Amino acid sequence: MSIATMLIVSFFVLGFLNVPIAVALGLSSCLCLTRFGLDMSILPTQVYSGIAKFVLLAVPFFILSGNIMEKSGISDKLIRFFKALVGHKRGGLVYVVVIASCFFAAISGSGPATVAALGSFLIPAMAKDGYGKEFPSALLATSGSIGTVIPPSIPFVMYGLVTGVSITQLFMAGIVPGLLFGAALIIASMFMIRSMDVVREEKAGVKEVWDSFVDAIPALMMPIIILGGIYSGIFSPTEAAAVACVYGIIVGMFIYKKIRLAELYELFRNSLAGSGNIMLIIAGASLFAWFCSTSGITRTCTDLISSVARNQFMFLLLVNVILLIAGCFMDSTSAIYILCPIFVPVAKELGYDLVALGVVFIVNLAIGNVTPPVGLNLFVACSIGEVTITGICKKVWPLILAAAAVLILITYVPMISVFLPRLVYG
């Protein structure tokens, strides 16, 4: 059995045995190291080098900021304001879900955090107004994926780390595709609710809108502070994540007064657990990617793709197909670490912008968050909405198709993604 065959077969066997992805990646690499008599002393060096990077400090900070936002009441203030603005329209709560998801995405950088923070309030509210539970759960799961596209975004940090592309430019490139993602979900949802007997919210008065706006100002300022600081060069994405945590604690403790000093330990503990999971995946994926590179697997795959995809159209079609399939079985971090070294050299050879490719990668993997069997957002939404995975899957497919339409658009019209970075950075 060749080294490549053993690596791939062992990884998929472990995956089908329901072994955690981080363990499957690391263990399959270790099996190959042992089987072919390679020096095991390189193992700790490669694992450490995979996670000992300054930019990865952004990951625990963004996870902590998402947990702080959920606990601090920021999500409640945003929902109240958006509900006062558009809640009275037919399908008004659909607008509230998507708009609130876009704003929360610009705070937490995490899809599951967005679903968890907004779903506990919005799913019961939509069920009460005649939307049922399955459609709101599917909509929250899909709109929560905007959290991986609109900056700040943890997957963009990973892509920038692996490829060397500017994370600031990647963040900027994700803004328009993320907004298009949200618009597509609203359009698809309007078609889906035509047969529903939904209740319209009572139109808010001017005073209620104004009061909700004033109450939401600290929450609305957060993405402005984070993204404004990054794009103006005041602080790096990693520093921005730390600023988000400090600002969130100040808002939660002293303005909205939803966080008590005694609760900070629990927030830090939960964030540490979430960060540990991601770091384990990064360690396993970096070892797996290193082994693929040193054994020649990456080079072979790159040559194969180059021979099949002789132009940008075929290459991008292949990228989307492979990433959509990978997203069904693999988390974003693992997919980025394993597939970027394969696709990036071909993209460079064909002259496709690596910033635009990063957006294509992340939108594909955002869709993967809501495709079974490993769609993390689906399981979070199922838990919060108290619906079955079968029920939510029936409602999520039209929304996935809407997201796929946006994916095709940004894939073959890369200027949609790159015009903002080029406008600013030339």
Image (cartoon, rainbow, N blue to C red):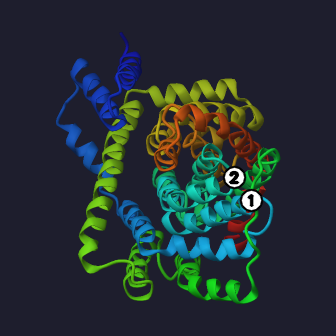
Q: Position of residue 335 (x, y in %)?
A: 49, 39
Of helix, strand and loop, which one carries label 2?
Answer: loop
Name the image quarter holding the C terminus: bottom right
Mark 1 and mark 2 in contact (Cβ < 8 Å)? yes
Whether 80 is drawn above or below 125: the answer is below
Q: Could you tell me the amino acid type at mark 1? A: Val
- In-image side of 153 versus 399 (left or right): left
Q: Could you tell me the amino acid type at mark 2? A: Gly
- In-image side of 85 versus 126 (left or right): right
Q: Position of residue 131 (x, y in %)?
A: 68, 50
Name the image quarter holding the N terminus: top left
Which residue is the site of mark 2? 130
Q: Outermost residue, top direction?
A: 1
Which residue is the site of mark 1? 199
**Mark 2 or mark 1, which has the lower sequence index?**
2
- Distance CA(mark 2)–CA(mark 1): 6 Å
